[in-house]
Amino acid sequence: MAVSRKSWPNLFCTCLLLCATEAASQQFQLEPPSSTVLRGSDARFSATVEGKWEVMTWTLRRFLVLTVSVTGNVTTSSEQFSAAFCSGGDTGCVEFTIRNTTRGDSGPVICTVQGEYGSKTAQLYVQESGTVNIMGGDVTVVQDQQVELQCVTTAWFPIPTVTWTQNGKAVDSSLYNTTDMANGDSFNTTSVLKLQAVSNTTVACWATVPALTNPTSSSVFLVVVPKPPNWTVLIAVVVGFGGFALLVLLIIGIVFCYKRRKEKQRNYQDEMSRRVKTQSQISGVSVAGQRQGQVNAGYALEGQTSVTPSELTESGFGQAHDSNIFKMPDAVNSNLEGNGYNSAYNTLDESGFRKHRHVTIV
Ligand SMILES: *[C@@H]1O[C@H](CO)[C@@H](O)[C@H](O)[C@H]1NC(C)=O
Ligand SMILES: *[C@@H]1O[C@H](CO)[C@@H](O)[C@H](O)[C@H]1NC(C)=O
Ligand SMILES: *[C@@H]1O[C@H](CO)[C@@H](O)[C@H](O)[C@H]1NC(C)=O
């Protein structure tokens, strides 16, 4: 068979074109490149093949777990795995499902299409949400006191993000510290929140991992009771006032008693002096009378009989009185007659004390 030399380049070009078209059609996509799911939930991957294909295999953690043909025949190693054509029955798209994922399912997911398509790899991450618990439950604190709350999360994978809220508002991250520790193939964390007790609030601790759409939380009620009054100050004030009042009362009492005693003394002295006066008046009057008599007697005796001082005795006076020689005018009477109704005179008693006496006659 003779081939013209001219036709060779054409043949080559046709082949090259054909090869290029074939290569372009033998491609497929695996979506998503990575999937993060919670343990126990399902994970799904889809392979979209451009062009003709016959057989497709799925490998999980290096084990072939499922085979699917373009006719729809599916062979699995376990009921956990399944495959189906995507919606609409398009044979160019296969959806691979891993049900009830376990932590052990984490790893590469490989899809291989028989032929020159080769294989594609995606990643599966299985996470775990554990428990959240604020230790101690509701707390009652005195206003302005520092409160320390401890939130413990258990059995999370990976390490959860722990945050706090107060009445639904995020608490500043500077107010809490979170530490974690491995607990087998998961993690426990302890978060310590320190805040100032201002008012009654609901404090919540939240923990989450990327696979979790709604964070898990634990909350407690923070009851803030008003500060009790400072009893020591109150007591001191009361005692101080009480002491002061007592002191004042004591002083008043002492002054009162002193005054009363003084008054009594004065009354007594007055009484005494009154009595003394009365007595002295009685005696003074008699003495004065005697003196008067004596003086008068001396006066009356002038020019008549000489009376020696020895005669100024009781008997002498009596003698004189009896003798009736001298009738001395009553001083009171004479004064009454002379000066009217008011008169005063001084007398001297034996002791030489001067007695001043007022006599009022109406
Ligand atoms: C958190 O830890 C750091 C360093 O250990 C410390 O300085 C800080 O006071 C802590 N904060 C709280 C709220 O415990
Ligand atoms: C994690 O928490 C659980 C439950 O509280 C506890 O039994 C376990 O000992 C903790 N693990 C570590 C490492 O602390
Ligand atoms: C907080 O609530 C308690 C009752 O639940 C109440 O007795 C107290 O006065 C409240 N404290 C403040 C600061 O409102």
Image (tube, rainbow, N blue to C red):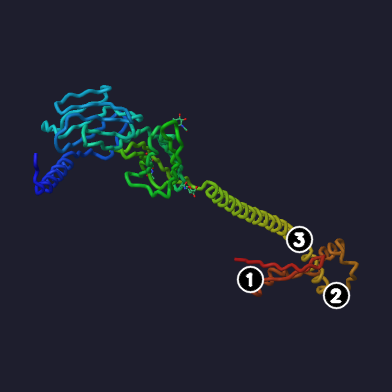
Residue linked to disc 2: 304
Q: What SS does tag 1 mark? A: strand
In the image: residue 112, left or right of residue 227? left
| Three-letter code, disc 3 | Ser
Report crowding for label 1: few under 14, some 14 to 19, many 20 or more residues within 10 A (C-alpha): few
Instruction: Count residues near mark 3 (Cα–Cα under 10 Å), then give few for <14, some for 14-19, many for 20+.
Output: some
Residue highlighted by disc 1: 342
Q: Are marks 2 and 1 in contact (CB under 8 Å)?
A: no
Write down the residue under mark 3: 280
The part of the image, by quadrant, that contains residue 109 is: top left
Please determine whether, in this image, residue 294 is positioned above or below residue 36.
below
- Whether residue 111 is situated above or below residue 270 in the rendered picture: above
Of the numbered discs 3 and 1, the one sitting upstream in the chain is 3
- Closest to the camera, between mark 3 and mark 2, is 3
x 41%, y 33%: residue: 186
Helix, strand or loop for disc 3: helix
Q: Amino acid at mark 1?
A: Asn
